[in-house]
Image: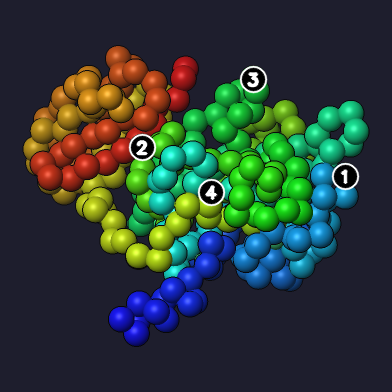
């Protein structure tokens, strides 16, 4: 009971650590303040017309650069609606938003990642689209920022979020500057990953994926509504599997007792 109370006292909705960063071309801004400048709440002084700009609040990832945030004293959990929000220093110029975008992935164990699907026309599903309001960052109705629902990737909880600068994949304003990632729905219970880390599938994939495992068995693929869409015999060696017949979106794979998820992108 005492341990439970202590955990409740120290737990918070903010990201708690950053176990990995890879800078790309043009990075540098904010590195002297990393990781503190991307942990905790977003810049409380940010507004849409005057967004955050200090190096003590922002980290520029650089072209194709990436950073991992870890939630240590809390997990982000899936409840109805938005489960976490990413804050960048998006500016409302009066005639539109100045946007610098990043891909968003989530993970339960920090080694197996699922990317949020995104729309190349509207850019919905990326981070770096919506300004920070300066209001309560844990309330998605008033916080601004880019909001994500774990329902969209079929996960009930995650402890890691990875942001990757979109580089040349998206026509945006330039380089993504991360301010913060904040849990909206969260739990103090630290959950152990159910995924067997000796089994992995490349995600996202388009026409084929690679499965790596030391096990043998029947690999089955299901859609999010439970429809069986493919089966393959696995012999314990890394294998590239033709996935052109699989539908796009979130897919579930089972091999013996292990359950994995992966995302097939629209071709
Ligand atoms: Ca936390
Ligand atoms: Ca949700
Ligand atoms: Ca920016
Ligand atoms: Ca910050």
SS label for mark 4: strand
Distance in Å between CA atoms under marks 4 and 3? 23 Å
Asked whether the viewer can see residue 46, the reply is yes
**Can you give x and y, in whole percent of width and height, for residue 234 in the image?**
14, 35
3D distance between C-alphas at marks 4 and 1: 23 Å
Of badges 3 and 2, the one in the foreground is 2
Dot in front, 4 or 3:
4
Tell me if mark 2 has few (under 14), some (14-19) or many (20+) residues whose alpha carbon lies within 10 angstroms of its own.
some
- Which numbered mark, 3 or 1, is in the foreground of this view? 1
- Ranked by sequence position, the earlier of labels 2 and 1 is 1
* Ligand 2 contact, mark 4 (Cβ < 8 Å): no
Residue at image x 39%, y 79%? 5
Cα gap from disc 3 to disc 2, whole angstroms: 23 Å
Measure the C-alpha gap from mark 2 to mark 4. Answer: 15 Å
Regarding mark 1 in the picture, which secondary structure is present there? Answer: loop
Q: CA distance from mark 3 to mark 1?
A: 25 Å
Residue of label 2: 154
Q: Residues within 10 Å of mark 1 (few under 14, many from 20)?
A: some
The residue at the point 68 percent across, 48 percent down is 143
Location of mark 1 (residue): 49
Q: Residues within 10 Å of mark 4 (few under 14, many from 20)?
A: many
Left or right: where does residue 12 sit relative to residue 205? right
What residue is shown at x 53% (from left), y 55% (from top)? Answer: 183
Q: Which residue is mark 4?
A: 84
Q: Which mark is residue 121?
A: 3
């Amino acid at each position: 009971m005492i341990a439970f109370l202590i955990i409740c006292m120290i737990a918070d909705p903010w990201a708690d650590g950053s176990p990995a960063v890879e800078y790309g071309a043009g990075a540098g801004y904010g590195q002297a303040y990393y990781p503190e400048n991307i942990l905790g709440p977003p810049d409380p002084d940010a507004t849409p017309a005057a967004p955050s700009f200090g190096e003590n609040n922002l980290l520029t990832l650089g072209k194709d650069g990436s950073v991992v945030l870890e939630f240590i004293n809390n997990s982000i959990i899936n409840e109805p609606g938005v489960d976490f929000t990413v804050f960048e220093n998006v500016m409302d110029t009066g005639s539109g938003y100045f946007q610098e975008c990043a891909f968003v992935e989530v993970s339960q164990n920090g080694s197996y990642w699922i990317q949020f699907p995104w729309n190349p026309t509207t850019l919905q599903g990326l981070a770096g689209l919506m300004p920070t309001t300066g209001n309560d960052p844990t309330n998605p109705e008033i916080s601004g920022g880019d909001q994500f629902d774990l329902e969209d990737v079929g996960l009930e909880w995650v402890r890691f979020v990875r942001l990757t600068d979109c580089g040349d994949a998206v026509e945006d304003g330039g380089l993504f500057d991360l301010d913060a990632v904040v849990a909206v729905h969260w739990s103090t219970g630290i959950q152990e990953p159910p995924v067997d880390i000796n089994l992995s599938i490349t995600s996202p994939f388009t026409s084929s994926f690679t499965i790596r495992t030391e096990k043998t068995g029947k690999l089955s693929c299901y859609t999010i509504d439970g429809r069986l869409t493919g089966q393959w015999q696995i012999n314990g060696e890394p294998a590239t599997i033709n996935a052109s017949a699989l539908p796009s979106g979130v897919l579930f794979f089972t091999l013996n007792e292990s359950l994995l998820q992966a995302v097939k992108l629209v071709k």
